Image (tube, rainbow, N blue to C red):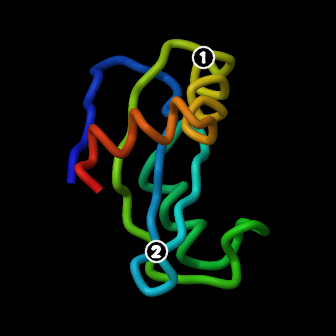
Amino acid sequence: MHFSYFCGMNYYAYVIYNQEYHRFYYGFCMDLEKALLAHNEGKIDLTKDYSNWIMMYHEGFASKLEASRRSRFYRSVAGQRYLKNILKF
């Protein structure tokens, strides 16, 4: 697993993974621990049918807009290639 840490960043774009169902979710947040907990507790509509999410990757950003754009990038073909290369998946 690869994690990207940036000190002093206010927002994060992240990738979580459910190994049992081989599902990825791409999102952004201000608190990575709270976000992962919310996913695993079924509080996020798009992931509530699955549990046991693990944090695969994240990047820090100074603004919500930057984090949101990066999260959208992960969903693109180029973003998928980028993540596949970074995560060796």
Frontmost residue, 27 versus 10: 27
Residue found farthest to the top: 62
Q: Which x, y percent locates residue 26? A: 58, 48
Q: Residue at x 46, y 74 (%)?
A: 18
Q: Is residue 52 above or below residue 12?
A: below
Q: Is residue 19 above or below residue 27?
A: below
Residue found farthest to the right: 45
Mark 2 residue crowding within 10 angstroms, few (<14) / some (14–19) / many (20+): some
Q: Amino acid at mark 1?
A: Glu
Q: Residue at x 66, y 28 (%)?
A: 68
Q: Residue at x 78, y 69 (%)?
A: 45
Q: Secondary structure at mark 2?
A: strand
Q: Which x, y percent locates residue 47? A: 67, 71
Q: Is residue 60 left or right of residue 21?
A: left
Count of labels in the image: 2
The residue tagged 2 is 18
Q: Which x, y percent locates residue 77? A: 58, 36
The residue tagged 1 is 66
Q: Amino acid at mark 2?
A: Asn
Q: Residue at x 59, y 15 (%)?
A: 63
Residue 59, quarter of picture: top left
The residues bearing labels 1 and 2 have C-alpha atoms spaced at a distance of 25 Å
Q: Secondary structure at mark 1?
A: helix
Mark 1 residue crowding within 10 angstroms, few (<14) / some (14–19) / many (20+): some
Residue 47, numbered circle: none
Frontmost residue, 30 versus 58: 58
Q: Which x, y percent locates residue 89? A: 29, 56
